[in-house]
Structures are given as structure tokens and as C-alpha cells.
Image (tube, rainbow, N blue to C red):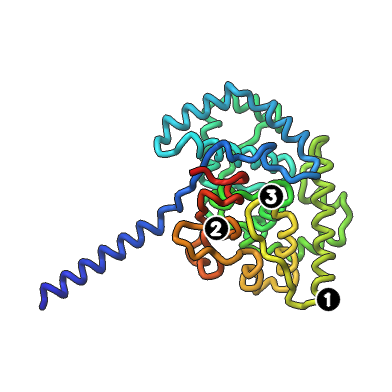
């Protein structure tokens, strides 16, 4: 009897250890570089093209190829396709650094590529001067924490300018999980553009129209939130059904940040994450699988996608 008890205890410890290991393993990402959206996945009518063109001119193929070669040598477990996705997201991060005064780094995978770029000191300095006008300093913030409101503003701005793909969600972490600071929304609602530009944005020839667009969008959404609240105090929205353009879905974030700040996630998750597919193979083509966080699975958290999911990676998964 004593032997049986010991065996059960050992088995229990082994199971707990395996559960801990599997929790640390990220879901397998079915990545193909040919699915990467064109034009950095920019949302139409954002006036972002001149800034994208400036970025691409500042990053010669020779430099990028050197970074790829060194990175793959140093990281044997990363495929060429995944590296292309990391570079894609890093480029979008660089765009944000030219628009916002503060842009924390929230992705360890993307930060690793940025760090590799720094190894080519002369090439990186030339890139920085051409694109940024001065040295673009590396300021990692990939260990979590930080200001939740700052992360929320990152999510909101990102969703106004770029498509959110399955890889975006995976590498940056769940979008719209934190509420915007209500005081910040109030500023955008009532303050003039010059005040907001000076406080939150970098103004250049390429970014000025983008900033005007962002300010106008948040002003509009704050007023829309008021109108929705008049009709329905708890709000009523259409669920996001697939990855891609989240620029209108961000209105949900604004509404619950204003009216239910302390209950934000409890209220917002019903609309920001649709129900996950019951299929063991992942998502069906009609289902948006929002959260990659295990704790949110009951509220629609399944980050995997099937080969037929047209919403995967901005252009469909490849088998």
C-alpha cells in the first residue's frame, strides 16, 4: 500500500512538472512570409505612406540581409519565415517611434531583432540618422509591467494605423486588455490639436498628417462613446470576427475606458473576443480567436488558427 501511495505522489509531481512546461510553450505559429501584408499592413486613409517610404529608403537590403544572416546563425530555432514576420513588426514599431513621443517595446521577439541591428553599429547609426534624424536609442521594455495606460494608448494607436494579424497578437501580447486613461481621453476630447501634439506626438513633415488623423479619430470616438451611452448605458457593440482592421473596434475600448474603467475588462472582453472554436484543430474561418492568454480561454481565448483561416496572418495560413 505504501508503495502505491509513493507511486501516485511521484506521478502527481511529474504531471505538475509537465503542466508547467507546457504552459511556458507558446502556441505554434503557422507562419509563411508570403502572408505578410503589403505596405506594412497600413490601414487605408491614414497618410502613412510617406513615412513608410522613408523607412524603407533608410534600410538598404545589404544591411537587412546582414542582420538576417547573423540573427539566424545566433538563433537556430527561429525559421526564416518567422524572422521576416519579426522584421515586419519591428518596422511598424519604428514607424510608431516617429509618431509618438514615447513608445515602449512590448515584444521580446521583436526586441531581439532590434538588438541584432545594433550589432552593426555604423549601419545602424546611418539608418537612425536617415530615418530618425538622430540616434534611435534602444530602450527595451519586454519584461512586462510598466504603465497599463501607456500600453493601452500603444494598442489604440497601433490599431488606427496597422492591421492586427495573428502574429501581431502573439508577439505584442493581447491587444485592448488595458483601459485607456480617462483623463487622457478627456484631454483628447476637449483640448486643441496644438496642445495634444506638443504633449503626445512628434511632429515632422511626414508625421503631421498622421498625427492630425489620430487626434481627430480619438476626439470622434470619445463623442461617439457619449452618444452610445445615452442610448444604452452598458453599451452594445458588434464583436470583432477576424484579424485585420481593428480601427473601429477600438471604439469599444474607448467606451468602457470612459464609463467602466474599474470594470473595464469584465465589460469589454465580451465584445473584443468572440467565442473560440470548439474544434481541436483551432479556429474556423468565421471565428476570431482573440486571446493568447490561457486565463481567458473561457471568454474566447484561442490563438491558434487552421490552414483555411482567411484571417490568419493578414492573408491566410499556409499548410
Viewer-side residue, 58 vs 53: 53
On the question of residue 284 being in view, the answer is yes
Question: Counting residues from the N terminus, which is met first, the one under dot 2 or under dot 3?
Answer: 3
Q: Which mark is residue 284?
A: 2
Q: Which mark is residue 158?
A: 3
Residue at 25% of width from left, 69% of height from top?
A: 12
For label 2, the SS is: loop
Query: Looking at the image, is 159 positioned above or below residue 120?
Result: below
Position of residue 138 in the picture relative to residue 231 (left or right)? left
Relative image position of residue 226 (x, y in whole percent): 83, 70
User: Which residue of the protein is positioned furthest toward the top in this rendering?
Assistant: 62
On the question of residue 114 being in view, the answer is no
Residue at 64% of width from left, 50% of height from top?
A: 164
Viewer-side residue, 204 vs 257: 257
Of marks 2 and 3, the one in the foreground:
2
Give yes or no for contact between labels 1 and 2 (Cβ–Cβ under 8 Å). Answer: no
Question: Counting residues from the N terminus, which is met first, the one under dot 1 or under dot 3?
Answer: 3
For label 3, the SS is: helix
Relative image position of residue 300 (x, y in whole percent): 55, 66
Amino acid at each position: 500500500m505504501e508503495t502505491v501511495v509513493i507511486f501516485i505522489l511521484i506521478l502527481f509531481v511529474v504531471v505538475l512538472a509537465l503542466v508547467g512546461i507546457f504552459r511556458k510553450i507558446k502556441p505554434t505559429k503557422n507562419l509563411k512570409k508570403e502572408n505578410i501584408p503589403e505596405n506594412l499592413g497600413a490601414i487605408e486613409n491614414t497618410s502613412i505612406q510617406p513615412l513608410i517610404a522613408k523607412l524603407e529608403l533608410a534600410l538598404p537590403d545589404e544591411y537587412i540581409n546582414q542582420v538576417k544572416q547573423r540573427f539566424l546563425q545566433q538563433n537556430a530555432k527561429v525559421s526564416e519565415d518567422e524572422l521576416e514576420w519579426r522584421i515586419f513588426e519591428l518596422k511598424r514599431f519604428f514607424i510608431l517611434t516617429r509618431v509618438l513621443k514615447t513608445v515602449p517595446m512590448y515584444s521580446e521577439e521583436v526586441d531581439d531583432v532590434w538588438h541584432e541591428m545594433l550589432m552593426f553599429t555604423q549601419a545602424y547609426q546611418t539608418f537612425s540618422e536617415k530615418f530618425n534624424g538622430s540616434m534611435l536609442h534602444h530602450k527595451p521594455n519586454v519584461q512586462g509591467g510598466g504603465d497599463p495606460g501607456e500600453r493601452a494608448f500603444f494598442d489604440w494607436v497601433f490599431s488606427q494605423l496597422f492591421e492586427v494579424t495573428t502574429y501581431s497578437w502573439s508577439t505584442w501580447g493581447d491587444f485592448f486588455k488595458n483601459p485607456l486613461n480617462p483623463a487622457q481621453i478627456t484631454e483628447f476630447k476637449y483640448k486643441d490639436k496644438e496642445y495634444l501634439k506638443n504633449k503626445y506626438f512628434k511632429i515632422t513633415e511626414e508625421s503631421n498628417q498622421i498625427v492630425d488623423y489620430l487626434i481627430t479619430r480619438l476626439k470622434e470616438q470619445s463623442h461617439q462613446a457619449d452618444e452610445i451611452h445615452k442610448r444604452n448605458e452598458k453599451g452594445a457593440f458588434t464583436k470583432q470576427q477576424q484579424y485585420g482592421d481593428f480601427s473601429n473596434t477600438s471604439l469599444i475600448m474607448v467606451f468602457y475606458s470612459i464609463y467602466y474603467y474599474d470594470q473595464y475588462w469584465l465589460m469589454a472582453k465580451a465584445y473584443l473576443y468572440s467565442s473560440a472554436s470548439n474544434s481541436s484543430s483551432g479556429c474556423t474561418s468565421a471565428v476570431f480567436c482573440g486571446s493568447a492568454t490561457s486565463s481567458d480561454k473561457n471568454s474566447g481565448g484561442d490563438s491558434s488558427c487552421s490552414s483555411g483561416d482567411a484571417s490568419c496572418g493578414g492573408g491566410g495560413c499556409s499548410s
